[in-house]
Image (tube, rainbow, N blue to C red):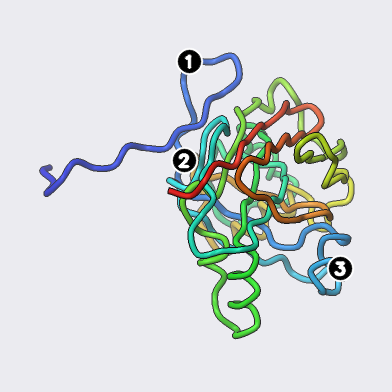
């Protein structure tokens, strides 16, 4: 097969202790999956069916590091999250079977142009401009579930310039990881290479160029990001 130009490189995330990497297919994100964060966004945290948005695979920044302040926003926010890496695909996956589809877990940041997200929300429009853009999904290395197990609790935190901004626990997820996978698989065929950002605890706030972010999920290491000036 020939192409009119060279296909773009596959985005790939390191796996702890391995030379092989995880090729990214799709990036799914769960919205408002912690009650306290739902409240700070002005929404009722009652357990309703989850909702999702997507980010581009090439918006993933493997390993974190420097990311540019994005264009079009004056209110650029951090959202620290546990990320699930799918290693086995499927449709209509039962909740009880969902862990067997997980290759591993990582720490991720759902970076958000909050002003654009809110403008779209208020007009009843999609969130794409607020959530789906270049360098919007920094992610740390993937830890295989075979070594870590499947967490149901664990501290989630984010510091900006040494000050704690976000603090929560995986036990506070409204929809658990298995429930999220099962629900999503009713609407999409999940495949190896999919990533699922599982939601963020309260404390989201703006960052500016020069800020240094350090995100942690207990048992899955640290993700460090520095915001640098826009391109």
Q: Give the numbered dot on residue 24.
A: 2
Q: Nearer the viewer, residue 37 or 51?
A: 37
In primary-sequence order, the first of circles 1 and 2 is 1
Q: Give the numbered dot on residue 19.
A: 1
In primary-sequence order, the first of circles 3 and 1 is 1
Q: Is residue 178 left or right of residue 14?
A: right
Q: Give the numbered dot on residue 39.
A: 3
Q: Nearer the viewer, residue 228 or 111?
A: 228
> Contact, CB < 8 Å: mark 1 with mark 2?
no
Q: How many marks?
A: 3
Quarter in which the N terminus is drawn: top left
Structural crowding at the residue carrying mark 2, measured as other residues with C-alpha within 10 Å and reported as few (<14), some (14–19) or many (≥20):
many
Structural crowding at the residue carrying mark 3, measured as other residues with C-alpha within 10 Å and reported as few (<14), some (14–19) or many (≥20):
few
Where is residue 141 drawn, in percent x and y?
60, 27
Tell me: residue 108, above or below residue 205: above
Q: Secondary structure at mark 3?
A: helix
Q: Residue at x 84, y 55 (%)?
A: 202
């Amino acid at each position: 097969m020939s192409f009119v130009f060279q296909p773009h490189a596959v985005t790939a995330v390191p796996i702890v202790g391995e030379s092989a990497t995880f090729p990214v297919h799709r990036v799914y994100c769960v919205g408002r999956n912690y009650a306290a964060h739902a409240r700070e966004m002005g929404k009722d945290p009652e357990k309703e069916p989850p909702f999702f948005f997507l980010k581009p695979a090439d918006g993933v920044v493997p390993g974190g590091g420097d990311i540019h302040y994005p264009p079009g926003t004056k209110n650029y926010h951090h959202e620290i999250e546990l990320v699930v890496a799918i290693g086995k695909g499927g449709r209509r996956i039962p909740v009880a079977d969902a862990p067997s589809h997980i290759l591993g877990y990582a720490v991720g940041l759902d970076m958000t142009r909050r002003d654009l997200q809110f403008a779209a929300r208020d007009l009843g429009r999609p969130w794409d401009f607020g959530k789906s853009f270049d360098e919007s999904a920094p992610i740390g290395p993937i830890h295989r579930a075979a070594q870590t197990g499947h967490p149901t609790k664990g501290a989630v935190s984010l510091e900006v310039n040494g000050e704690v901004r976000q603090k929560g626990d995986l036990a506070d997820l409204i929809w658990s990881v298995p429930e999220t996978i099962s629900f999503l698989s009713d609407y999409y065929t999940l495949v190896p290479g999919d990533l699922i950002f599982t939601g963020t605890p309260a404390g989201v706030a703006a960052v500016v160029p020069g800020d240094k972010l350090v995100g942690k999920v207990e048992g899955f290491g640290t993700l460090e990001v520095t915001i640098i000036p826009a391109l």
